Image (tube, grey):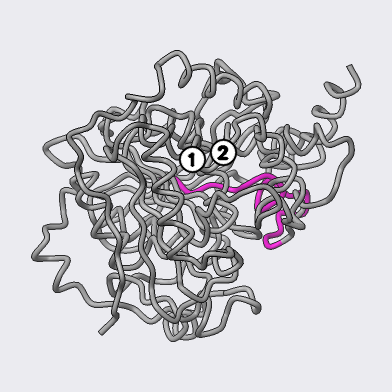
Amino acid sequence: MLTVRLFVSLLSVTALGAEVTPAQIQEWRTRIKQVLFVPDPPPPLEPVSYGSFEPTPGVIAERISYSTEFGMRVPAILYRPAKRGTQKAPGIVVVNGHGGDKYAWYSFYSGMLYAKAGAFVVTYDPIGEGERNAERKSVTRQHDISVPPEEMGRRMAGLMINDVRQAVSYLAQRPEVDSSRIAALGYSMGSFVLGITCAIETRLDSCVLVGGGNLDDPGGYWDRSNHTMCQAIPYKSLMFLGDRGAVLYTLHAVRGRTFVFNGTLDGVVTSEPLGPQGFFEDLRKRTIALGGGEKNVFEFGFEPGAGHRPYFVTRPATLWLARQLRLPNWSAGDMAKMPETPIGEWARREHVYIEPAYATEMREAGTRAVGSGIPGVGREQLHAVPLDQWQRDKDRFVYESWIAKAKALVAE
């Protein structure tokens, strides 16, 4: 039986915002978007559908794309229940870690898992991965290539934030989706992207950050990150906020609920001088002091003895998310009885690729994912854009095109 230590915020009678004015909140959000070149207003969505398939009984996977900045496009897979419910469904956006994309095991696993729960789930390719890679390869980490000047790193973060916001827009415009019940789930790099996105994207009801969420002090993990383009440069650029972690999580709280979950042995959070628990306790106190109350201040928890994993497929996160989004097909009683799938064994059985550095019991292979009977999905099935159309419009998808367009603006 998995033992989980969970530290949750208590409801407070003190309203958030006693110390922070609406004008200050708006100023922070506006400045963040300006510094990171987040398009505001966002570009037209222009969604395109390329057909669908049924990866597992009761779940339909739609092949889609939508627009992002510079007129470029994001290939994605939307997972949804095969049978339309009597009421509108919640929506979920999955934001990958480094090297991950819609082909990553946790992307399609979470897509099918939460679609079975009654949600519409968007998984997509980050810039430089999957169909946004010129060779349609995954695990390239192409966006980590250092491209001077530092403004390019800020623009890279802005692109990643905009990709998430456009996924929210895609879900919100679907007639089957309840636009007031949309969540975003981020793992590792995705937790960093959502650390900022969930502070400025007010349409998000809930956010889950795993394998990170430790928005720390100057010289900390994110400032020192060797992933300079998507992490170190963008985070340093937010120094104007002062206590960056407390300000960002105050903005989260104004927006809605946030849940942070990590392994106690995850190097991302063990790097903090106070230790994982002490760090998050201290950050919560500072956030409460800044915002003037505990309402919606992030909750956090740990899996003892575990490392870097996409915990949003595990029981603590699924229980939390089911409560926030009111997932229609999961009752509390049903979830208590749901079995767990050891991901290492599942990957071997289903011939699913896990990056070797993460295919260990301490890391992703040790994940105990909620549910059973979720199949592996072949790479060919997860291509969103037909090859002939992708080749014709390649410049609207790939990393090199975005770099050229961003450089042109820097030169101006």
- Residue at image mark 2: 243
Q: Secondary structure at mark 1?
A: helix
Look at the magenta stretch and give its main secondary structure. Answer: loop
Q: Element type at marker 2?
A: loop
* Residue 393, magenta (yes or no): no
**Which of 232/362 is in front?**
232
Assess whether mark 1 and mark 2 are in contact (beta carbons under 8 angstroms): yes
Direction from residue 195 to residue 57 in the image, left or right: left
Position above or below: 389 against 320: above
Q: What's under tag 2, amino acid-wise?
A: Asp
List the residue tagged with mark 1: 246
Residue 280: image location, x then y, percent: 44, 56
Q: Is residue 359 left or right of residue 127?
A: left
Q: Horizontal placement of 141 versus 95: left or right?
A: right
From what the image shows, is residue 231 above or below residue 204? below
Residue 9 location in percent, x, y?
A: 27, 50
Q: Observer-nearest residue: 275 or 36?
A: 275
| Magenta highlight range | 122-139
